[in-house]
Image (cartoon, grey):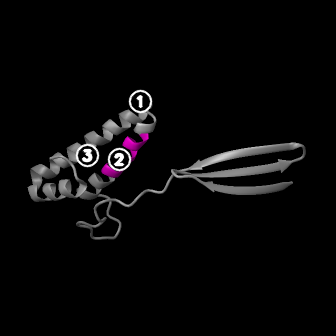
Amino acid sequence: MATTKKIKATKAEKVKTVKKVSSAKVVKKTIKTKPEVSKSVIDKKPKAKKGKDTGSVEVQIDNFTAKIKSLIKHLKKHGQDNDSRRGLLVMVGKRRRLLNYIRKSDLKRYAKITQKLKLKE
């Protein structure tokens, strides 16, 4: 029984092709893996006490913005994908609520975030 593995990279995602050769059968499997996440616009430590800060509002807004941009790119290719469209609208709403919270609490932080992320005010 011989087993060979090939890894082929495309623009958006990595595809792993596995061939298994057994007695009188050839089986091919294609496994898609997620693409690497690009670096975000804001540093990950605006007010971080530790290196991996995911809870601060600025970082959450930044993460939502990165996800929103990737979903917009996806929806330009796949216009009929209504499930992804709904997920996009949910994320936009969450980001909007976080931005409203910052705007009410600290207007300077709000202006800084919208300027760095190039969002409309």
Out of 1 and 74, give the one closest to the viewer: 74
What residue does disc 1 label? 82
Instruction: State if disc 1 and disc 3 touch (CB < 8 Å).
Output: no
Q: Nearer the viewer, mark 3 or mark 1?
A: 1
Q: Residue at x 44, y 56 (%)?
A: 37
Amino acid type of disc 2? Lys
N-terminal label among 1 and 2: 2
Residue 81, position as x, y percentages in the image: 44, 32
Gap between marks 1 and 2, in whole Å? 16 Å
What residue does disc 2 label? 69
Amino acid type of disc 3? Arg
Amino acid type of disc 1? Asn
Q: Residue at the bottom extreme? A: 50
Secondary structure found at label 2? helix
Magenta range is 65-74
Gap between marks 2 and 3, in whole Å? 13 Å
Is residue 101 found left or right of 81 in the rendered image? left
Other-residue count near label 1 (Cα within 10 Å), few / some / many at <14 / 14–19 / ≥20: few
Q: Residue at x 68, y 50 (%)?
A: 17
